[in-house]
Image (cartoon, coloured by chain):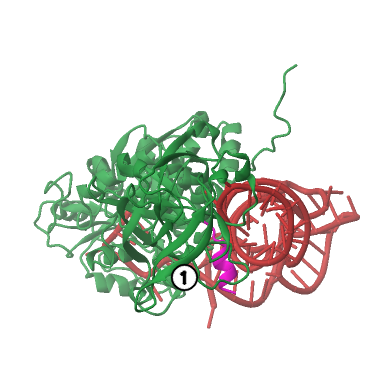
Chain colours: A green, B red
Amino acid sequence: MEITNLEVPKKSLNFIETMVEQDLKDGKNGGRIQTRFPPEPNGYLHIGHAKAICLDFGIARNYDGICNLRFDDTNPVKEDVEYVDSIMDDIQWLGYQWKNVYYASDYFQQLWDLAVELIKQGKAYVDEQSAETIAKQKGTPTVAGTESPFRNRPIEENLELFAKMNTGEIAEGAMVLRAKIDMASSNMHFRDPIMYRVINSHPHHRTGWQWKAYPMYDYAHGQSDYFEGVTHSLCTLEFEVHRPLYDWFIDQFADSAYRPRQTEFNRLNLTYTVMSKRKMLQLVQEKLVSGWDDPRMPTICGLRRRGYSPEAIHNFIDKIGYTKYDGINDIGLLEHAARETLNKTAQRVNAVINPVKLIVTNYPEGQVELMCTENNPEDPAAGSREIPFSRELYIEREDFMEEAPKKFFRMTPGQEVRLKSAYIVKCTGCLKDDEGNITEVYCEYDPLTKSGLPDANRKVKGTLHWVSATHALKAEVRLYDRLFSVENPSADERDFRDLLNPDSLKVLTNCYVEPSLSSAKPLDHFQFQRIGYFNIDPDSTSEKLVFNRTVSLKDSWAKEQSR
RNA sequence: UGUCUUAUGGUGUAAUGGUAGCACUGCAGUUUCUGGAUCUGCCUGUCUAGGUUCGAAUCCUAGUAAGACAACCA
């Protein structure tokens, strides 16, 4: 008998999926589903874009549709090919493939022709007023605007001037083309919006100096959607007020029942993070971070370098959902998604990041034993490996206390602890230098408690990680923490640069890791046992290993201590 | 004194007129050769006031609060 998955609860749909399914049911647009991801190539993609990418590409994937990548490159002043390449890399790294790559600049001629058409219909005009005057005439949300004196100039004159706007004869800022709609509209975007402006100071990254007049977003975006056959144009909430204009432009030219439809969802806000391109660019340019891929940045490349896997990011995006409520997500949820994903996949290794020497005084000098240890207790298929044990080891400095509180289950004189995958040892004391710093810790091992032997099953409160002093590899470890010290930097009145967390990066240069790590490659991720998840930084070389901390393990002892 | 949008535990998100659920966080416990992970339990919520209905988080009205919109940016 066929077993159905009746017990598996159906994941509830978000409001956009609900709409898509309804459209499909209604046979809208011939049952076609087409989305697009429309970045402007003026910056690197961040986790907020990942949310949009997962929606745009995910809808297409789940409903048998297509998703195109379209660069919204209508402003040559800000855009650059550098960004085009990184954007494509990041999308693919997230696991998506577009059907086609398009550029709004592909449509410059088509858009131009349509604008000419609009002028001929008397629905657009060339305005010669300054930007300031136009802004002043726009009125305010509660006060109607006033009409431009150029609003009713003859169609022939408009056509002539519009042509000149693109030849270089007209100075930048001297003229614009405006749609003639309604200067008294309660929607500010209807007060004769600008369709074209002159830019002749910058070449376009694809069309060079060919165009001098460039279309504005409201005109270009919707028409591009229309040209391509987009059915669902998904964007963030701040474009809600633009939607009537989006529809207006399409209504001017549509020649069939097909209509792209814009739907807005909430953008991603994260605590202890800024998500604005402008602020991120400032952090990079002012060298407050090491670059767009600084592991503290919320950029996709930053998260990648930090050690986040695409799965971890998908896991996070799945948890936060899509709604119309503009809230702020706890970055702890992103960190949780990383732990949850990495826990199942990360190879466990021993690394001591703040070392103190531990000498097993009754262990034969010169002897080395290879201890067998699991690669990942969460994944039996991950197998096991051997790690060398010897008389002189390194353990974490914090794992020893000369005078310890009752609940300290680690190394302290007279107390037994387990050295993971090796022996149970009893601490016998320590050596201090003249200033009272602990330089060596001593213990004795019980040969009958080697892992795997019956006596090893003895209950011991604490288990410590360790590396063999002579076999360990020296490494640099970069401990990253939240970039900002306040929960919502964007809502803070102070300059966001004054809100940076001074402890967001700590570099530890005197660390030791187990020898198996010699073959690790950049971006390989690991769990440093009892410490956290780490990956290999691209700066790493075979002479000098460099690790980044992705996220720490939950630490209930630290919590206990901070009470 | 405009237009548009939103309001469910501390945070995010479900419930599509019919028992307010899930995740994160927090707390307590279980278990453990990672003070991790696992497992269990607990705390905490429908903005307010009316209305429609046998029945409202859901529909209607009015308030309140929050956000977006007045770039030759996207």
Name the spot of residue A452 as percent of width and height, x first: 57, 38
Which chain is disc 1 placed on?
A
Name the spot of residue B8 as percent of width and height, x first: 68, 63
Q: Is residue A316 left or right of residue A507?
A: right
- Identify which amino acid the numbered label 1 is placed on: Asn
Q: Can residue A329 be seen at all in this image of the molecule?
A: no
Q: Quadrant of the N terminus of chain A?
A: top right
**Rendered position, A383 above or below B24:** above
Magenta extent: A553-563
Q: Quadrant of the C terminus of chain A?
A: bottom right
Q: Is residue A225 left or right of residue A413?
A: left
Q: Can residue A410 be seen at all in this image of the molecule?
A: yes
Identify the residue under disc 1. Answer: A488
Name the spot of residue A443 as percent of width and height, x first: 48, 59
**Rendered position, A263 above or below A478:** above
Q: Quadrant of residue A206?
A: top left
Neighbour tally class for label 1: few under 14, some 14-19, many 20 plus, Cα within 10 Å: some
Point 28% across, 55% down: residue: A43
Q: Is residue A558 magenta?
A: yes
SS at mark 1? loop
Name the spot of residue A288 as percent of width and height, x first: 28, 68
Point 42% across, 58% down: residue: A358
Residue occupying the far top of the picture: A1
Point 27% across, 67% down: residue: A282
Residue occupying the far left of the picture: A169
Q: Nearer the viewer, residue A59 or A284?
A: A284
